[in-house]
Image (cartoon, rainbow, N blue to C red):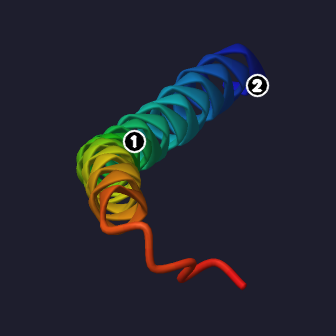
């Protein structure tokens, strides 16, 4: 009878271990999905920031060209505007 009881105890212990392992595996998969979603969100955010940065860089370059054009035009009038 004790041999039968010991076998049942071992089977029950293995079932519990398998259950815990499945729970850990499911929790791991769930956390991986959360991390993947967060990485995707961060990637999209970074792309938006990079695009905005490029737009601002282009605007600054255009403004600099406009300022230089305006300075050269004012200089052509010889009215000493810089002083």
Q: Assess whether mark 2 and mark 1 are in contact (beta carbons under 8 angstroms).
A: no
| Residue 2: assigned label | 2
Which of the pair 12/53 is nearer the observer?
53
Q: Position of residue 35 (x, y in %)?
A: 44, 45
- The structure residue drawn at horizontal position 31% and vertical position 42%, both measured from the top left corner, is 54
Answer above or below: position of 23 versus 18.
Answer: below
Q: In the structure shown, which secondary structural element does the residue marked by tag 1 occupy?
A: helix
Which of the pair 47/33 is nearer the observer?
47
Which of the pair 44/29 is nearer the observer?
44
Q: Position of residue 8 (x, y in %)?
A: 56, 27
Q: In the structure shown, which secondary structural element does the residue marked by tag 2 occupy?
A: helix
Q: Position of residue 14 (x, y in %)?
A: 58, 23
Answer above or below: position of 82 versus 67.
Answer: below
- The structure residue drawn at horizontal position 39% and vertical position 42%, both measured from the top left corner, is 39
- The structure residue drawn at horizontal position 62% and vertical position 17%, both measured from the top left corner, is 7
How far is the residue under mark 1 from the one under mark 2?
55 Å
Q: Which residue is mark 1?
A: 39
Which of the pair 33/37 is nearer the observer?
37
Q: Quadrant location of the C terminus?
A: bottom right
Looking at the image, is mark 1 or mark 2 nearer the viewer?
1
First in sequence: mark 1 or mark 2?
2
Q: Quadrant of residue 13?
A: top right
Q: Position of residue 30 (x, y in %)?
A: 35, 47
Q: Furthest-front residue in view?
A: 78
The crowd level at tag 2 (other Cα within 10 Å; few <14, some 14-19, many 20+) is few
The crowd level at tag 1 (other Cα within 10 Å; few <14, some 14-19, many 20+) is few
Answer above or below: position of 20 versus 15.
Answer: below
């Amino acid at each position: 009878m004790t041999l039968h009881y010991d076998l049942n105890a071992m089977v029950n212990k293995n079932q519990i271990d398998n259950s815990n392992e499945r729970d850990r595996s499911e929790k791991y998969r769930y956390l991986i999905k959360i991390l993947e979603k967060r990485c995707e969100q961060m990637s999209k955010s970074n792309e938006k920031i990079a695009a905005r940065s490029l737009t601002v860089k282009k605007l600054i370059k255009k403004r600099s060209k406009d300022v230089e054009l305006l300075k050269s035009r004012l200089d052509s009038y010889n009215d000493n505007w810089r002083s």
